[in-house]
Amino acid sequence: MKVLKFGGTSVGSVKGILSVKKIVEAENEPVIVVVSALSGITDQLYKTAKLASDGDKSYLAEYEQMLARHEEVIDNVIPTGKKEEVLALVQSQFVDLSNIFRGIYLIKDISTKITDTIVSYGESISSIIVAHAINGAAHYDSKTFIKTENQFGKHIVDFEKTNALIHETFASAPSVCVCGGFISTDRDTSFITNLGRGGSDYTAAIIAAALHASILEIWSDVDGFMTADPRIINNAYVIEKLSFIEAMELCNFGAKVIYPPTIFPVFHQNIPVKIKNTFNPEAEGTYISREKTGEAGKAIKGISSINDTSLITVQGLGMVGVIGVNYRIFRMLAKNGISVFLVSQASSENTTSIGVRNADSALAVEVLRKEFAYEIAQGEINEIFSEDDLATVAIVGDNMKRTPGIAGKLFGTLGRNGINVIACAQGASETNISFVTDRKSLRKALNVIHDSFFLSEYQVMNIFVAGIGTVGGSLLTQIKKQQQKLMSQNGLKLNVVGITSSKKMLFSREGIDLENYSEDLKAKGVDATPEKICNEIINMNIFNSVFVDCTANSQISDLYQTLLQSNISVVAANKIAASSSYDNYVNLKETARRRGVKFLFETNVGAGLPIINTMNNLINSGDHIQKLEAVLSGTLNYIFNTLSAEIPLSKAILMAKEAGFSEPDPRIDLSGKDVIRKLVILTREAGYKVEQTDVTKNLFIPDKYFAGSLDDFWKSVPELDAEFEEKRKTLAAQGKRWRFVATMENGKCQVGLQDVDNLHPFYDLQGSNNIILITTERYNEFPMMIKGYGAGAGVTAAGVFSDIISIANIR
Ligand code: ADP
Ligand code: ASP
Ligand code: MG
């Protein structure tokens, strides 16, 4: 014999009931079918009762709507010959219901007893409909055999009576029996009661246990028990097998698939449970049994959460070493029917924290204050308060006890994402670690835990891109091209969740479609300011996130500190921050280190060339950088390579600008400003303290040319052509070339024009290439050399991209 339970999600629609009919009719073993009310009806019954008792006439409209919904279902699921009969049965139930509502409306008062009666109609009616929809099924009224007793105002099942009545009721039952879940009656008064919200699962488990069923099947609208609530985690997936203990832990902490008390009766009788999908019966579902998962199984099986948590802390020096404080706390709470789902006590014994539901928190504080009034007055125990609006998260798995480091990984991951753990608890059985955090961090916490513990699927990285010009635009194109491959080969999902141009910004938690982002930005984007961008990112509070700055804007680089502080990594193509004051540079790096995130800016120097990374690797492995010699301006190199008898200086500058090598204002390159910034960044990364003003400049264009407007500059710069041509000829005759060289020696920096002969490694530097020679303790006689494209959107974007990937790899 099997017990099948179909929830509101299954019987809530015509399609669902027809599917239930098919599933049950295909059974060849005897079955008892337990059904919930149509989805939403229990809520609507509570609501209608409330409206009526408030004297609000709109209760009638709710009532009519419920009636119409049931009539429509009957019309579509009951075979033609039986329709009239079922309609009459259901309508007569509705007549009773309408009389009760009218009574409440007139009296404008309601008791729990009446509310319990009202909500029982949901299951009474649905079970009649389903019983008649299934061929050969007989209907049974659960109110006659599920008996409860009253404890602290709660209805507790009287198993002795209930089990006896179940045996009696089903002693000679037909092969398909249908009854309502959830509903019951008081063993002493026979008043209608129920087993609590979601209680139909429990009814089914009680029947299964009483009759020693071969299996209990819980049918709803998901393919099985999933690693997390699929409404919060969209890459949650179905767990094949769970032990009773794991299932119990997960439901206790809010996994809504099964009502928590359900496991208990079947666990004792060793009756396995299957979670199945009414809308996809072929799916295997989840099998819950006594079987322990093998050693090879995952350390954690699932995550669940309760979002209405209050934490009450009883604290005080007077508690240390005093026997019986905890006894008094729990006795008082139990006496008042308050259920505690998390307890945490430090070994110093001066603090006990208790997690209860928000709804219980005021009463819990009140009774504890009363209990400890004397100790509080004496100052032995501090005033007792509750912290509300918190959430509890639990990670569950039998294999946790065999796997060291789970707690470390959990709290490390949470810390890196800026999620504050307010209290935590792990039972000695090690099947569950639970912690309490702010409710607003719940979504992020669940996502980040799922992401880091269920790597079999993929890891998500959430990216914000500021600036969609040449570099930002190329980056988005590259990400789009790589997305699929990174997901299938590296298990990494790059999710671009925000894009901002200088005017508009667009955010989407689910990810922005990179095919049409620029149209979407125009159509759906909202006005952007640096402040708004920052607020939006922080409020989104999304896990594993990286801010990528592809602008050259100082207001954007001013945001880094706040972002890093909010545990958001920063990847900058923008050079302003790393070359700003030394204090700011150090602060940013420090903040990143403290928050466990990254501040990376490899592309600040030499575009995609691995210069900063290489230097970091040398230093981290114990080397010491003594000297740097480099050509770091693609623009200047291009100009010096272009100069000839036919192309004078002014023309070469213009060509560099037109080819897109120079900054829009080429004076930034010509004045050496750009090279100075880069040299400052390298020098700092090499371990020296330096400011831009410390760099000695040996410029080739006199200062006065930089004084006026850009127009003035273009007009006056040809004055330099003749003199330059003279020098160029002399140099060419000596077999030498000009290079604009940046040098650092033991922390001293200078930039300036140098002539190099054909034996010098800088002589053959083509186009806009960059080169750097790094002299270290280890690379001494022959310095290390890195050379290649030092500018261009494609290589710069690629460098930014690899910074992003390197952040993903450290997790
Ligand atoms: P029914 O009305 O059939 O009893 P419920 O709504 O009580 O169904 O339970 C099924 C729902 O539980 C699913 O639709 C899903 O949204 C939710 N749920 C929450 N946590 C989980 C989880 N870990 N695995 C599967 N479903 C979950
Ligand atoms: N209908 C009841 C409820 O909504 C019981 C159930 O669906 O399991 O709480
Ligand atoms: Mg349910």
Image (cartoon, grey):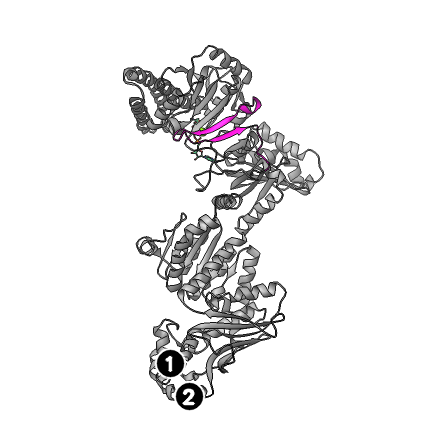
Q: Main secondary structure of the magenta part?
A: loop
Q: Earlier in the sequence, mark 2 or mark 1?
A: 1
Q: Nearer the viewer, residue 430 or 775?
A: 775
Q: Is residue 705 magenta?
A: no
For residue 38, what is the image quadrant? top left
In the image, farthest residue toward the right: 321
Q: Residues within 10 Å of mark 1 (few under 14, many from 20)?
A: few
Residue 628 appears in view: yes
| Above or below for 487 versus 36 | below
Q: Is residue 79 left or right of residue 189?
A: left
Task: Give coordinates of residue 523: x percent, y percent.
Answer: 30, 54
| Above or below for 786 versus 716 | above
| Above or below for 754 versus 249 | below
Q: Amino acid at mark 2?
A: Lys
Q: Which residue is mark 1?
A: 708
Q: Is residue 103 left or right of residue 751?
A: left
For residue 25, what is the image quadrant? top left
**Residue 729 — which label?**
2
Given this view, does label 2 or label 1 mark the residue nearer the observer? 2
Task: Give coordinates of residue 648: x percent, y percent.
Answer: 36, 84
> Magenta segment range?
266-295
Residue 43 appears in view: no
For the point 39% across and 79% down, which residue is it? 642
Q: Nearer the viewer, residue 462 or 193?
A: 462
Q: Is residue 277 magenta?
A: yes
Task: Give coordinates of residue 760: x percent, y percent.
Answer: 52, 79
Q: Is residue 779 left or right of residue 751?
A: right
Q: Quadrant of ligand 2?
A: top left
Q: Amino acid at mark 1?
A: Gly
